[in-house]
Each structure stands twice: as C-alpha cells, then as structure tokens.
C-alpha cells in the first residue's frame, strides 16, 4: 500500500500533509510513503529529512500519482491532479465538498474514494484526527499577533512616567476553537477582551479565559447546531445580534471574526455601516474570509483600508506558521489513516461513524448527503 505526498500547488499554501514524524508512524504500520521532491521545503522539511524517516523521494508528479493507492494532501486536489489519480485510489484532503462540487464530480467519474478532513466527526474518539480544530487553533493565535502589530497601540495596560496607557479592547465574534484561542492570546498580551457567540453554552469557556461574554437574549438556544457547530439563526435574532455587535464594535480596537458554518457561505456580522462607526486605526481580522467573510467589505487574501479601518482577509493563516501547522495536520491525517488501516490494507467500514462521516465519494457514488444535495443544486442553477 503506497501513500503519496505531493507538493501543494495552490499559491500561498506552505503546509505539507506528512512530516518525518508521521512518515515514521505510517511506515511502521506497513505503509510505503512516497514524497514528491521538495514537497516539504515550504515547511522547512528537506528531502533528506524524509529519507531518514523512511520515505521514498519521487522526482516526477505523474510517477507519484501512478504509484499511489492513497493521496494525502492539505488543499483539495485540482482537476488536473484528479485526472492523474488511479481509478479506485483514496484521496484525503481539506476539501469543502459542498462548495467544490466540480471536484467531487471528477472524483466520482474516476471512482476515487474521497475523504475530507473537514468532515471528521467531532467526537471523543476522533479528537486526534480533528484537523479543523488543530488548524483553527493556529489561526486564532496568529490573528491576534497580526492584529497587535497593525494597531498603533500597546495591547496591555501600562503605567509609565509619562502617564497611564489604557489597554486595547479586543472583540472576538465566535467562540469556537479559533475564537477561544484568540481570546486566550489577547488576554496574555494584556488586552481587555469581549466575546460574542450565538451558542450560550460557550459562555463559561469564554469567562474562564478572563473575557466578558456578551449575548443576545433569546427564548430558545437559537444558534446551537449538531456536533457542537453553530447553526443559522432567525431573522429576529439576527437583528438583535447586529444591534448588540454594533454597540460593542464601535469601542473596539481589534475585532476578530471566526463565525463559519462548514460548507456554507460565512454569515454577515459586520456590514459596511458598522465599519464606518469603528475607531480610526482599528483592525478587523476576518477568519471567515475563505467562505466570503463575516465583514461585508472583506476581500479574500487581501488587506484593505476603509474609513481608516484595516480589514485583513487572509484566508489561510495556518499557512503562515507552516512548521507547527504541518506538524499538527500531518498527525491528524496519520491518525485517521491508521484508524482505517488493518492487516496491511485499508478497512473502509461504512458502518463506522468516523469512516463514513469523513467519506464523501466511494465506488463511483456520492456517499455524503449534503454534498449530493449541493451537486443537485449546482445542476439546477
């Protein structure tokens, strides 16, 4: 069984799907790991590092795919890459299947078994495989550091001979993994931190990190979805939410938005009118830029200024920390692959909730219902 690790082809993607540490784990289990030449350079991993861990270095991309039973990637494979996959091969990547329906269709046509790290169930058993959380943690951490370098202020309270410097105010919208890490990092830097989330259940976590939780009063738990994710809320709730956020955002120096529903356009939390009322010199870090952004003015992978407010739409903050991002992602991928691997072969037990949950194509059919529905909608539109 050969697992291939190709170079990532998308611009700005510096991560790699396997590290020397994960290669050792896979080879110990009997999997042959073949790594494309220079695949790890952007993560500061040399070909010699891979060789010493037991991997084979392959010069040609086409040869790599010709040999491969399993293809391990960070980003979704491009159409050109899928065309080189062997029929019946297994693909593991960070694919948003309900948005990349053209890629799903290409995999179906090649009878590729597709697994998305986006679809790993958030269960106790699958924690080691939860790549969404490992990468979101990095994004939350880095967003605060980037923002602190952009505002023209100190973050902490400082007592100086020239007078007292008041701490910066940070508002975090969304208290999932990225949001909680952003809160913790901003508090370590000494900022005053407030946080908002549609799920009241996260209030205790927010307050345990030293931040103030702001919430919309509602008769029911509007934003609580399955598996710990947020879900869309009613129009009445959204109006109350916008009014509340508007009041707090006007006093913030840094706003970090992390509200993202997997596979869906990001909810709009900050319309243009709110940006106009923000303090000059303040910063918005939009961690939902990949799916359209939580701010109306966000431009994916661009940093703009509107009314003296900086809006950062960097969509792949984990790639700015490729050493640890690759290390964590590779561990997640290896844990998932080894979970499916028994007695020298893949055991694709469709009754297993982790395997079936992460799978979206198998033997020429789409196995993930939301992906099938998205494909149907794309055909109708």
Image: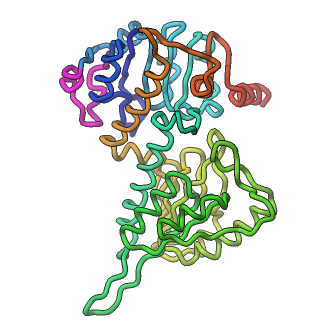
Q: Is residue 362 above or below residue 355?
A: above
Q: Quadrant of residue 27?
A: top left
* Magenta-tinted stretch: 34-53
Q: Is residue 367 above or below residue 269?
A: above
The residue shown at (54%, 49%) is: 289
Q: Residue 276: x and y, percent?
A: 60, 72
**Observer-nearest residue: 341 or 184?**
341
Determine the residue located farthest toward the bottom in the rendered image: 162
**Observer-nearest residue: 217 or 113?**
217
The residue shown at (48%, 70%) is: 210
Horizontal side of 181 relative to 100 (left or right) equals: left
Q: Residue 9: x and y, percent?
A: 40, 28
Looking at the rendered image, the quarter that the N terminus falls into is top left
Confirm whether the magenta stretch covers residue 43.
yes
The residue shown at (62%, 70%) is: 214
The residue shown at (36%, 25%) is: 7
Q: Residue 20: x and y, percent?
A: 27, 27
Q: Quadrant of residue 369?
A: top right
Residue 152 seen in render: no
Q: Is residue 119 above or below residue 106?
A: below
**Observer-nearest residue: 26 or 65?**
26
């Amino acid at each position: 069984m050969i697992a291939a690790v190709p170079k990532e082809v998308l611009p700005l993607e510096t991560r790699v799907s396997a590290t020397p540490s994960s290669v050792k784990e896979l080879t110990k289990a009997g999997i042959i790991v073949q790594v494309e030449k220079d695949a790890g350079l952007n993560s500061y991993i040399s070909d010699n590092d891979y060789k010493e861990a037991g991997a084979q270095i392959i010069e040609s991309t086409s040869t790599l795919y010709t040999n491969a039973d399993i293809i391990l990637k960070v980003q979704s494979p491009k159409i050109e890459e899928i065309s080189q996959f062997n029929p019946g091969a297994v693909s593991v990547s960070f694919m948003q299947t309900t948005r990349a329906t053209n890629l799903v269709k290409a995999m179906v046509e090649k009878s590729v078994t597709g697994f998305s790290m986006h679809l790993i169930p958030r269960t106790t058993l699958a924690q080691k495989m939860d790549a969404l959380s490992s990468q979101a943690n990095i994004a939350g951490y880095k967003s605060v550091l980037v923002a602190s370098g952009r505002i023209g202020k100190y973050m902490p309270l400082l007592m100086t001979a020239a007078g007292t410097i008041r701490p910066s105010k940070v508002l975090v919208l969304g208290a999932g993994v990225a949001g909680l890490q952003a809160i913790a990092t901003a508090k370590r830097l000494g900022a005053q931190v407030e946080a908002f989330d549609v799920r009241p259940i996260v209030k205790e976590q927010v307050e345990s990190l030293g931040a103030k939780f702001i919430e919309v009063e509602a008769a029911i738990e509007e934003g609580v979805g399955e598996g710990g994710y947020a879900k869309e809320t009613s129009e009445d709730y959204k109006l109350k939410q916008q009014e509340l956020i508007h009041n707090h955002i006007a006093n913030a120096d840094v706003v970090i938005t992390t509200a993202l529903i997997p596979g869906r356009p990001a909810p709009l939390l900050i319309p243009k009118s709110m940006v106009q009322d923000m303090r000059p010199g303040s910063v918005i870090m939009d961690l939902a830029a990949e799916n359209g952004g939580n701010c109306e003015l966000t431009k994916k992978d661009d940093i703009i200024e509107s009314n003296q407010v900086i809006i950062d739409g960097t969509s792949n903050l984990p790639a700015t920390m490729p050493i640890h991002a690759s290390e964590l992602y590779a561990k997640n991928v290896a844990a998932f692959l080894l979970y499916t691997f028994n007695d020298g072969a893949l055991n694709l037990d469709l009754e297993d909730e982790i395997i079936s949950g992460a799978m979206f194509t198998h033997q020429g059919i789409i196995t993930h219902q939301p992906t099938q529905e998205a494909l149907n909608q794309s055909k109708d539109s």
